Amino acid sequence: MLKDQSTATNGSGIGSLPPADINAAVIAAMDGEAASICRAAGRMAQLHPEHAEALFGAASQVAAVVQQIADGGG
């Protein structure tokens, strides 16, 4: 996905950014996606309460991995 947004011909786009800036941009995007997953899990749990525990467990795992990456963990 990021490769599609970069342009090698004119030096603009995400590919022209320093690696730390690219990492920060990706983490910010992932954080937003994790928040969306949590909201969607909440809505789905309202419709299917029998699956609420699994939905929130999965959403929590996604959020935890994004946080671990943001904190510099592997």
Image: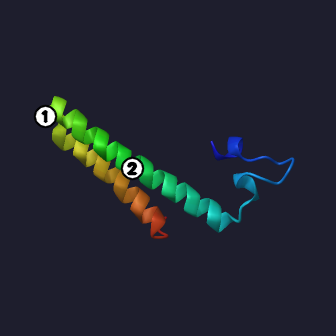
The residue singled out by tag 1 in the image is 49
Residue occupying image coordinates x 40% and y 62%: 67
In this figure, what is the number of numbered marks? Answer: 2
Residue 24 coordinates in the image, percent (x, y): 56, 63
Residues packed near mark 2 inside 10 Å, few (<14), some (14 to 19) or many (20 plus): many
In the rendered view, does 29 fall on the left or right side of 42?
A: right
- Whether the residues at callouts 2 and 1 have beta carbons within 8 Å, the answer is no
Residue 68 coordinates in the image, percent (x, y): 42, 64
Residue occupying image coordinates x 69% and y 44%: 5
Q: Residue furthest bottom?
A: 72
The residue singled out by tag 2 in the image is 34
What element does badge 2 sit on? helix
What element does badge 1 sit on? helix
Residue 53 coordinates in the image, percent (x, y): 17, 43
| Above or below: residue 11 compared with residue 51 | below
Q: Quadrant of the N terminus?
A: top right
Residue occupying image coordinates x 16% and y 34%: 46
Q: Residue furthest top?
A: 47
Q: CA distance from mark 2 to mark 1?
A: 21 Å
Residue 11 coordinates in the image, percent (x, y): 82, 54
Q: Quadrant of residue 16?
A: bottom right
Residue 37 circle label: none
Q: Amino acid at mark 1?
A: Pro
| Above or below: residue 68 compared with residue 41 | below
* Pointer 2 or 1: first along the chain: 2
Q: Amino acid at mark 2?
A: Ala
Residues packed near mark 1 inside 10 Å, few (<14), some (14 to 19) or many (20 plus): few
In the rendered view, does 11 fall on the left or right side of 54?
A: right
